[in-house]
Image: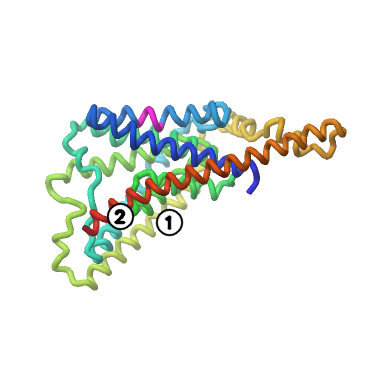
Amino acid sequence: MSFERLTSVVRVISFYFTALMLMLVVGGILQVELGLVGIPIYQVLIYLLLPILFVRTVERKPIKPFLRLNMLTFKGVAKAVLLGVTCWFMVQQLSTALILLLHQFDGEMIQPYDFLMDAPVWLLAIVGMLIPAIVEEVSFRGYVLGALRPLGPVAAVVATGLLFGMLHMSLVRLIPLSLLGMVWAYVVQRTNSILPGMIMHFVNNGIALGLTVLLSNQVNAADLSVTESIPALGMWLMIGLYGSMAVGAGIGAFFLARSFSPADLAHPAEALAAEEALQQKPDTELLLEQAVELPPEYRAMSQELALLRERRRRWLVTGGVLAGLGTLLVYGFAVYQELSVVFG
């Protein structure tokens, strides 16, 4: 792996581990002390201010082009809303298939956000819709996707989606949320604007929370007592049906996502120029690449820079491995607790 790619991976792992620890410690304290009001506070502190801090101090890049803060046309906004609805339907069908599959193995899906249902509607909208749609997009489709540019478009989208899925500390919900994160990252990458991600995130959470509030006194999506009388074959057919609908919606979402392009930006030329300026290499990297063309005295300097760079690479690998292991340990503990409840 090249030094540039290694650096980008380590920076993202460090950011992710830092955000995770702050969420568990600071977020936990604020939620205990302030209740639901503490949730939007730690969301802003961690998922908005932290990525901005990393962009300015770690990446040392201008905030607007790095986070892709570019405006959309009306057509771009409309397509983002439509894709948001399509993605919600895809995830809903896939989640239903997974719930039924768990039931086949005597598992019972848990509802991690039941405590939000007692909140006023306005607070629920802020905590569950508005703020996550902004701050989580700044963190993932903004900083993480931006920092992983050196990996290439495909790897950056896949990695961003997986990290987004893991953030929710659930193995059962990992696949649906990771797919969701990948689609959003793909659209943000194609448009070079973070706004489609924010719009789709808001639409997805809005539909999910709205239906939960409206139907909370009528039906529980995880209550499968009504399926007890359905034969095993019928259950497997239902799982296949919901899975097929999820696949169909996913195909539709993919082609709709491919329809996005820089033409959906309000100022595409300005965004392109900013992106090209962002990709320019630092002077030290250009010096190393051109070392063979330099006089002897400058070649010695470039060799010293290369040695320092190799030492830095070793430190980066060590730090990245430690942060990665810490993240996996936290995620593994959360998954263990989840499965203990699901199959308990």
Q: Is residue 135 visible?
A: yes
Instruction: Answer with mark 2 or mark 1, whichever residue precedes in sequence.
Output: 2
Q: What residue do we see at 55% from left, 30% from top?
A: 58
Q: Where is residue 76 in the image (x, y as percent from the top left)?
A: 45, 37
Q: Residues within 10 Å of mark 2 (few under 14, many from 20)?
A: many
Residue 311, image x and y in percent?
Answer: 65, 39
Mark 1 element type: helix
Q: Mark 1 is on which residue type?
A: Ile
Mark 2 against mark 1, which lies toward the viewer?
2
Range shown magenta = 43-47
Mark 2 to mark 1 CA distance (whole Å): 17 Å
Name the residue: 25% across, 41% down: 209
**Quadrant of res 231:** bottom left
Residue 114 in the image: above or below residue 235: above
Residue 95 is tagged as 2
Tell me which residue sits at (76%, 34%) in the image. 287
Q: Could you classify mark 1 by the number of other residues whose Cα lies within 10 Å: few (under 14), some (14-19), or many (20 or more)?
A: some
Q: Does the magenta stretch include residue 8?
A: no
Horizontal side, residue 94 vs residue 54: left or right? left
Residue drawn at 23 percent across, 28 percent down: 33
Q: Nearer the viewer, residue 94 or 53?
A: 53
Q: Locate residue 184, reporting x and y percent.
A: 44, 44
What residue does disc 1 label? Answer: 251
Q: What residue type is labelled 2?
A: Ser
